Amino acid sequence: MTEMAPDPRTGSRTPSVTRRTSNLSTLLRQQAARRRDQTALIRGDVVWTWGELDDRADALAAALTDAGVGSGDVVMLHAPNSRDYLSVMFATWRVGGIVTPTNAKLTAEELVQLAEVVRPALLIVGAGAEDHAAALDATPSWAISDAPGSGATPHVGRLIDKHLGARVPDAEVMTGDPAWFFFTSGSSGRPKAAVLTHDHLAFIINNHIADLMPGLSSDDATLVLAPLSHGAGVHVLTHVARGARIVLLPGGSLDTAQAWELVAEHRISTMFTVPTILNRLVQSVAGDTDHSSLRYVIYAGAPITRQDQRRAYEVLGAVIEQYYGLAEVTGAITVLPPALHDDVPTYQGIVTAGYPRTGMTISIRDADGNPVPSGERGEICVVGPAVFAGYLENDEANAKAFQDGWFRTGDLGVLDERGLLYITGRASDMYISGGSNIDPREVEEKLVTHPKVQAAGVVGAPDPDWGEVGYAVAVVDDGLTAEDLLGWCREHMARYKAPKRVHLVDQLPTTAYGKVTTPVLRQLLQDAGVWPKGGSR
């Protein structure tokens, strides 16, 4: 008998039932049934069909079963992109496991910290990560690489070869069952694993197709430019869902000339990247570069300046598209489609991040959780099916992240009358100088309006007189000195907002995720010996 739970708002009774949901593994299974002999994945000279990719997932699922890995078990995947990366993901889901991809650039010590959170039943590591496996010696480990591998350590490729022909049914999963433990790139202190469920990711896939790549089909192809461990992996799932070809870079690092050659050769129509990589791609476009096949070049993960945005639009055309979203909302908060890139609306020099994604609601709220009027700044809060299930076994983080049912992003922003969102910065990055709150993002946007400033980052540094002051890190053209730029700042922005110090560099530092963040800027200034003595913020 179905239980009826009272609605606390209306007193009415609605069905309360236990529901099964689709296993994400079904996405691959369905494509293999419909397009068995059509190309699914390309890496260098290796070309696999949907049938072959599905067979490999089945074979690896059989190996996982033999190893005792099943429903609810965590498979931690610590490796760069490889041709069997997707095989691991789908095989894990096929047996009911939870995949936990990690950034391949993490140290062994950092990986141990993540493992303490998710407690993996199996660790799969890429070539050269033997120290990482040794650091987790209590956890069984397999190796993964494009080469077949040798030695006593079980290798994904060899295990697949051994079990080819096996058939493993998709494990039954329930609504709310975890599929992916997604570590947030901005974690501080104890690492936080965002719980992404099968039904949550199914919504994300549909939402990405509806809002980012309308009309995505088996005629399309994507070039994977970023690690599959994070946003690029979610992007690829949308292509599996539609039977679109997936092309992996043949090497471990980005060669922009090679990337454009692959775009032309395989008639690439979609790409996902971050602003720093988008800028590199745009700068490498030559007169004979053929990018006519591109339909959607999606960028996300970090702020972009209007000048970089305009340059990309002018070079690539009306194909560039931005989305805004955190790991916890899996890239599905806003979208700025190609049509709005010709004349992007701005707020105090900050370009809009677009309008809310389908099914999502955004509210700007003050510190007490009250909504603020249109045009006023506050914390960006969201609700909708794209919001994650919460952090794994972290009640303290969950209590901070949710307020009255709203997920608090930690980002500051403004909504205008049309519902366009402008992200002004991170609440944690704000600093207070002489009693005035200052958003580094606002100062950065002003700095790059200088004709000789190519890029800039700003952090708050301790100051005995003002409490905190701005320190700017800038990439500039030859001939512009730090003193000249400081003088320009004092002429073109309120005195309290102008940086107290400018440090010139050839390139802004980034995290392993390609982001310019406050910690990496602060570390650069400390390493350069220009950070205030005794200042630890």
Image (cartoon, rainbow, N blue to C red):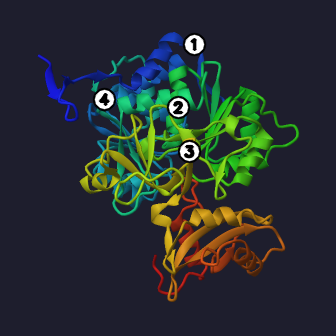
Q: Nearer the viewer, residue 5 or 234?
A: 5
Residue 454, percent across and down?
74, 62
Q: Amino acid at mark 4?
A: Gly
Residue 483, percent across and down?
74, 81
Residue 37, numbered label: 1
Q: Amino acid at mark 3?
A: Glu
**Vertical placement of residue 52 versus 114, above or below:** above
Residue 508 visible in the current orientation: no
- Which residue, given by chain and number where applicable, does mark 2 sit on? 208
Secondary structure under tag 4 reads: loop
Secondary structure under tag 2 reads: helix
- Which residue, given by chain and number where applicable, does mark 4 sit on? 96
Q: Residues within 10 Å of mark 3 (few under 14, many from 20)?
A: few
Q: Residue at x 54, y 42 (%)?
A: 419
Q: Earlier in the sequence, mark 1 or mark 2?
A: 1
Cα–Cα gap, marks 1 and 4: 27 Å
> Closer to us: mark 1 or mark 3?
3
Q: Earlier in the sequence, mark 1 or mark 4?
A: 1
Along the horizontal axis of the image, is 172 left or right of 381? left
Cα–Cα gap, marks 1 and 2: 26 Å
Q: Residues within 10 Å of mark 4 (few under 14, many from 20)?
A: many
Q: Nearer the viewer, residue 302 or 260?
A: 302
Question: Please, which residue is most extreme toward the top here?
Answer: 34
Secondary structure under tag 3 reads: loop
- Which residue, given by chain and number where applicable, does mark 3 sit on? 417
Residue 360 visible in the current orientation: yes
